[in-house]
Amino acid sequence: MTLKLWNTMANALVELEPIHAGEVRMYNCGPTVYSDPHIGNFRSFLMADLLRRTCDQRGYKTTQIMNITDVGHLTTDDVADATGEDKLEKKAREEGLDPFEIARNYEQIFHENADQLHVRKAHEYPRATDHIPEMIEMIEQLIENGLAYSVEGVGVYFRVNAFDQYGCLSGNTVENLDSGSRVAVDDRKESAHDFALWKIDDKHLMQWESPWGKGFPGWHIECSAMSYKFLGGTFDIHTGGEDNIFPHHECEIAQSVGSGTGDFAKVWVHARHLLVDGEKMSKSKGNFYTINDLIEKGYRGYEIRYSLIASHYRQPMNFTIGGLDGDAKALQRIRSLREKLEKWSADPSEVIEGLEVEIETARNGFNDAIDDDLNISGALGVLHETVRSLGRQEPKGDSARLALGFLSHCDEILGVIFVEETSEEDGLSEEQQSWVLGREQARNDKDWALADELRDKLQESGILIEDGPEGMTWSRIR
RNA sequence: GGCGGCAUCGCCAAGUGGUAAGGCACGGGUUUGCAAAACCCGCAUCCCCGGUUCGAAUCCGGGUGCCGCCUCCA
């Protein structure tokens, strides 16, 4: 039983063989904190979380680092167009706030959303702006190694033609890039493909001193500098969204390997982008969802989580609200069984023949699916089959505890069954409470007409009433 | 122009040579004061055309269609 992952670098499924036995060190490209994180962002972060949880469960000592990009990326080609404006800066101008304040604000929202989706905390969340000296140091080393050069008053560039491995991750070669290039050539650079390590621009709001003049770091250097600081020059896994493959990760490799710190990441795992309603998510199409949008619509964090992890991270998932509703329903069946099992576990034990074997088989099936490049869909298939079977068998006492153990094992990875909503559930209004009490009385009196009327009233007010063998329960309708 | 990926039931989605998991939806039941939930039953031969093989959704060749990346983007 070994975890296999699709390594973008090898373009093949590879077994995870940690550099240090029993220990996995992982770097995740994290959020850029200048807007509310959307479901696409979190699909990628959740993939990293699944990886983290899987490593934890397999007994590895896992070190997970996720960066916070609080230096904005340029919105337009920074080389061809010197008026290129930083995203944080743009936001700052629009919102009339200090860019650092904005970054901190969105960083906070990112953490809140991550908590709501029950994402396990990374061990560190280093901020780019806290590591300017480390970046400068690495740039100096690159210059010393002949892989970077400074242009007076403009900045420092990486000399792509001097780095043979450039293109090893994306498959892009410099020649191929030339053919379809959209890059405007800047003659201050030696080659059109050279990318910035340090930029000098007076108009930029975030500025730091450097040997090459006051300026700010290039887009890619933060990950090279921070991964080195926290994980060393060679580590096990690097993750990100598929769009990061080129240029971001390609450039990181050039910087890190080029600076001589080590071999950099062994396994590269990239999450495919998701579509919404079959189309690329965009604000203008009205199919753009932030996590907060969905929370406001009344979806629970664990429902959103389930829906975003239910399809394979390397498949172009198509997110729809209808799909989320269906997923929420499927998840609810699992959670209902959990509640029943907890109740049944207090009953006297009764032996169910074959249950132990069934659970063991299911557990192996679940593990095998996860091992197979985090095949959550396959794992969920096993889980759902078992849930139906357990619902039929209604195990009590020890048998119930055995079943709960299985659910709990699955949930170490899934994080959707035993977790509770982090936000407070609002109680019923006084009027609603009176209807509930009135309905209970009516049911006792067998006044079905009144009972049904009150149930309808509650439903209209957004409360769903369900009668069970042990009384009624209510839940909020979204 | 270059690089990469995908095509399985109405929708979502497993499956990587041995006779199509699972979920949602849908239809029929059990149960329930009614309903809901739960459980039971039913519900596809895998884009097209060739080939390899005793045997292919799975391998090979050729089509067709779709998508991502190629310096904003998870």
Image: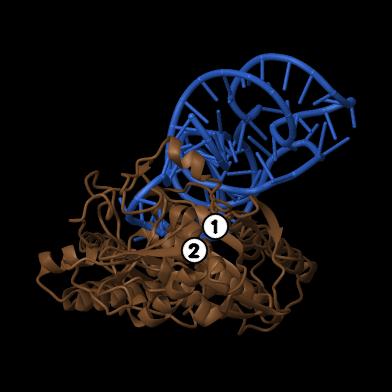
Chain colours: A brown, B blue
Is disc 1 placed on a helix, strand or loop?
loop
> Mark 2 and mark 1: span between their CA atoms?
7 Å
Is disc 2 placed on a helix, strand or loop?
loop
Q: Position of residue B67 (x, y in %)?
A: 43, 38
**Label 2 vs 1, first from the N-terminus:** 2
Local crowd size for mark 1, using a 10 Å CA cut-off: few (<14), some (14–19), many (≥20):
some
- Of residues B30 and A400, the one nearer the viewer is A400
Chain letter for mark 1, please: A
Tell me, for residue A163, which label it has, or none. Answer: 1
Q: Position of residue A209 (x, y in %)?
A: 27, 80
Residue at the (15%, 69%) spot, across then down:
A92
> Which residue type carries mark 2?
Leu
Q: Quadrant of the N terminus of chain A?
A: bottom right
Are the residues under marks 2 and 1 on the same chain? yes
Contact (CB < 8 A) between labels 2 and 1? yes
Q: Which residue is mark 2?
A: A147
- Of residues A218 and A381, the one nearer the viewer is A218
Chain letter for mark 2, please: A
Tell me, for residue A60, which label it has, or none. Answer: none
Q: Quadrant of the C terminus of chain A?
A: bottom left
Q: Position of residue A190 (x, y in %)?
A: 39, 52
Say left or right for A464 vs A432: right
- Of residues A385 and A128, the one nearer the viewer is A128
> Which residue type carries mark 1?
Phe
How many tags in the picture? 2
Q: Is residue A388 above or below residue B49?
A: below
Q: Tell me the quarter of the picture where residue A297 sits.
A: bottom left
Q: Is residue A45 above or below residue A7?
A: below
- Residue A241 visible in rendering: no
- Of residues A384 and A320, the one nearer the viewer is A320
Residue at the (46%, 58%) spot, across then down:
A159
